[in-house]
Image (cartoon, helix red, strand yellow):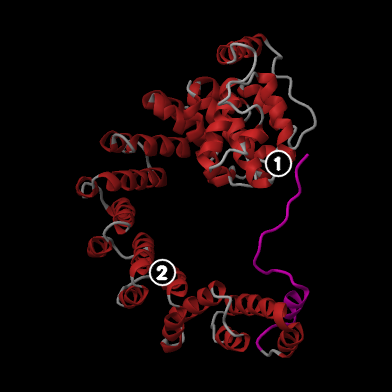
Amino acid sequence: MAMNQSVTIGVAALLIGGVGGFIAGKSGGSDAAGDSASVERDAKFRREASAVHQDGTAPESRARSIKEALREPGQLARLQSLVDLYEGMSLEELAAAADSLDDLPMADRIMASILLFSRWGEADPQGALAYSETMGFGGMFARPTILRSWASVDPVNAAKYYAEHPNEFNGPGGRRGPGGEGGADLVAREWAKLDPDAAMAWANSLEGDDKGSAMISIVGEVAATDPAKAATMAATLTGDDQMRAYGEIAQKWAAEDFSAAESWIQTLSGEAKDRAMSEAVQVLARTDPDAAAAKLASISEGGARDRAVAILAGEMAQEDPAAAASWLGNQQTGDYGDAMRRIMTNWTAQDSAGALSFIEAQPVGEIRDSATQTYLWQNQDVEPSQAMSLAEAITDERNRDRTIGMTARRWMETDETAARAYVESSDLLSDRAKQRILDGRGGPGWGGRGRGR
């Protein structure tokens, strides 16, 4: 298989796995040639490498190491250089390359790791998975990439391995893997690209959550190229699985042909129809907000309509946040807060003074609370006393405490004495909230994590 497809797989793995996962932490390589199949694969990849290296050395155009590949000018050139490098490596060399990843800066390590485990997952998936077991916490993030790469070329055996080792692809406490996809989803999506009917037959053999999620993944993959066939497949599902599948189809179909998608949606009924139409409207909102707004009337009041309103408000706000806010005020929705957060995120970035004027003109309530909270979290240039005055007016106690705490911690960076005095004298904060703020706990930011070994 051409390694260029592995680039696609690797980039997808980044999206589902998160940047923190590809932290290779290991001393020593895996025993990739533990069985005859591995030996045969190793010989195959050595032959491929020797075809490229006719005189035993790398061509001028091929990097000789990961670090050399990463010195290429331009990000795309670095990606291609890594692809070429990994394509010419034997299994032993892939393991050695994985050992060296710890020496790279984080951003480079992420890029190099994604492509390495994608290649290794195609060449010797069981060897790559064995290596991932030595990586500590980071292995939890590498394994989905390996499984997905394996399934892209050999879904039958990837599915068999997953069935025998499902817990290898779960997060801490049995939760689904990074990005919300489980191992069954990864296998299903890749298998559906090769043979959707066989993939669906396999998914039907699963049990519990895996069965429904795998089927939905297959339907979503088929919908990208043949939404009518995907709709036929989804009709065999039941309950929430069917509604989720209809949502996947509506998204994909609406992106290609909204009119055709809408015609199909009209054949549905009840909650399934509302959910599918909501998903289609959200897609339409990205290219034609006015047309999308006109379609809202066809969605019954409820969660599906609320989600469409929020997405549409955010899309409108990219062009004219004031107009988006005015439009939102005329909508019936059960969640003004989500829609206003999307509007205010754009408004604060585009015109913070205008955003503040809007807030000050609003009556007490959900819209003002949400607008104020988003404005203060997005805008670090508000004068501390003004920021505190705005935060204190938030009516929801939990959100008020969080926003006051965030504002106080920012204030401490420029005038710790004044900020601490404010917190200590506040009549709005509980003693517990005061202590958390003064101790610097519970604020925004990224938690730390060591390199798993």
Q: Amino acid at mark 2?
A: Ala
SS class of the residue under badge 2?
Answer: helix
Residue 377 visible in image: yes
* Residue 75 % position (x, y): 54, 42
Report crowding for label 2: few under 14, some 14 to 19, many 20 or more residues within 10 A (C-alpha).
many
Q: Which residue is mark 1?
A: 104
Number of marks present in the image shown: 2
Check the image and report above or below for 8 versus 447.
above
Assess whether residue 218 is covered by the magenta stretch.
no
- Examine the image and state in which quarter residue 218 appears: top left
Residue 147 relative to residue 173: left or right: left
Q: Which residue is mark 2?
A: 339
Q: What span is colored magenta in the figure?
A: 428-453
Depth check: 86 or 60 in front?
Answer: 60
* Residue 406 % position (x, y): 64, 75
- Examine the image and state in which quarter residue 63 appears: top right
Residue 24 relative to residue 175: left or right: right
Q: Amino acid at mark 1?
A: Leu
Magenta-colored segment: predominant secondary structure: loop
* Residue 283 % position (x, y): 32, 53
Check the image and report above or below for 146 versus 127.
below
Depth check: 6 or 338 in front?
Answer: 6
